[in-house]
Image: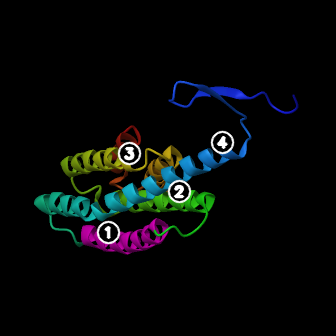
């Protein structure tokens, strides 16, 4: 017999069937499984992104409970622009536009963009109040945990989100070592990296 050896599997009817690993049926099953994985992931991420304003309200409430700051409103406004773009692209992807690898690439890019938006929070709020910084770190860890189920089917997209949420702090940290608020800000950044 030429080619790879056929593999045995049970087709749930009680009889064992033969299927080559490169037969048209196995390729189409694999493609169908990947397509469904991407569809479910896009749908779940879309629903999760719709809940992002709840997180913004928590952040604004926490910050304003300690001191009134327009910087946090600026952060939320910037995030709103990012969210509008995320939802627009996810809605188009839910409609089935693009190939599966193209949509997976977009899921990675959108996850990184979401991570950057959440990761920008310390630039607008940290350094004013140590207690507030710790509460915001806890909130950011919670956001990371809440995003896990929505991105579970494509874990590399979740990794892109987590990596991007920490990258702004890491890159700017080298430049602002002389800033008086830097030690508290850096401590908070290290705590969030451990989440």
Can you say which quadrant of the picture contains the C terminus?
Answer: top left
Which quadrant of the figure has residue 188?
Answer: top left
Element assignment for label 4: helix
Magenta span dominant secondary structure: helix
Q: Position of residue 180 (x, y in %)?
A: 34, 55
Element assignment for label 3: helix
Q: Nearer the viewer, residue 157 or 137?
A: 157
CA distance separating discs 3 and 4? 30 Å
CA distance separating discs 2 and 4? 27 Å
What residue did someone put label 2 on?
A: 108
CA distance separating discs 2 and 3? 14 Å
CA distance separating discs 2 and 1? 22 Å
Q: Position of residue 145 (x, y in %)?
A: 33, 44
* Range drawn in magenta: 71-94
Q: Position of residue 60 (x, y in %)?
A: 20, 63
Tag 4–tag 1 contact (CB < 8 Å) = no
Please tell me how crowded label 3 is: few (under 14), some (14-19), or many (20+) other residues with Cα within 10 Å. Answer: some
Query: Which label lies toward us, 2 or 4?
Result: 4
CA distance separating discs 4 and 1? 48 Å
Q: Earlier in the sequence, mark 2 or mark 3?
A: 2
Q: Quick check: 149 above or below 117?
A: above
What residue did someone put label 3 on?
A: 148
- Residue at screen point 40% across, 62% down: 117
Q: Earlier in the sequence, mark 2 or mark 1?
A: 1
Q: Earlier in the sequence, mark 3 or mark 1?
A: 1
Q: Earlier in the sequence, mark 4 or mark 1?
A: 4
Tag 3–tag 1 contact (CB < 8 Å) = no
Element assignment for label 1: helix
């Amino acid at each position: 017999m030429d080619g790879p050896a056929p593999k045995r599997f049970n087709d749930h009817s009680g009889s064992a069937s033969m299927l080559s690993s490169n037969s048209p049926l196995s390729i189409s099953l694999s493609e169908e499984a990947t397509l469904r994985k991407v569809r479910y992931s896009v749908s779940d991420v879309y629903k999760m992104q719709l809940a992002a304003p709840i997180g913004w309200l928590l952040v604004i409430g926490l910050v304003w409970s300690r001191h009134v700051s327009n910087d946090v409103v600026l952060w939320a406004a910037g995030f709103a622009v990012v969210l509008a773009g995320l939802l627009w692209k996810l809605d188009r992807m839910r409609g089935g536009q693009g190939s599966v690898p193209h949509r997976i690439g977009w899921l990675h890019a959108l996850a990184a963009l979401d991570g950057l938006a959440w990761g920008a929070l310390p630039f607008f709020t940290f350094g004013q109040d140590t207690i507030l910084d710790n509460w915001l770190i806890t909130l950011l860890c919670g956001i990371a945990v809440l995003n896990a189920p929505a991105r579970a089917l494509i874990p590399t997209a979740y990794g892109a989100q987590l990596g991007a949420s920490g990258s702004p702090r890491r890159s700017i940290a080298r430049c602002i070592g002389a800033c008086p608020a830097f030690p508290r800000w850096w401590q908070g950044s290290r705590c969030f990296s451990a989440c």
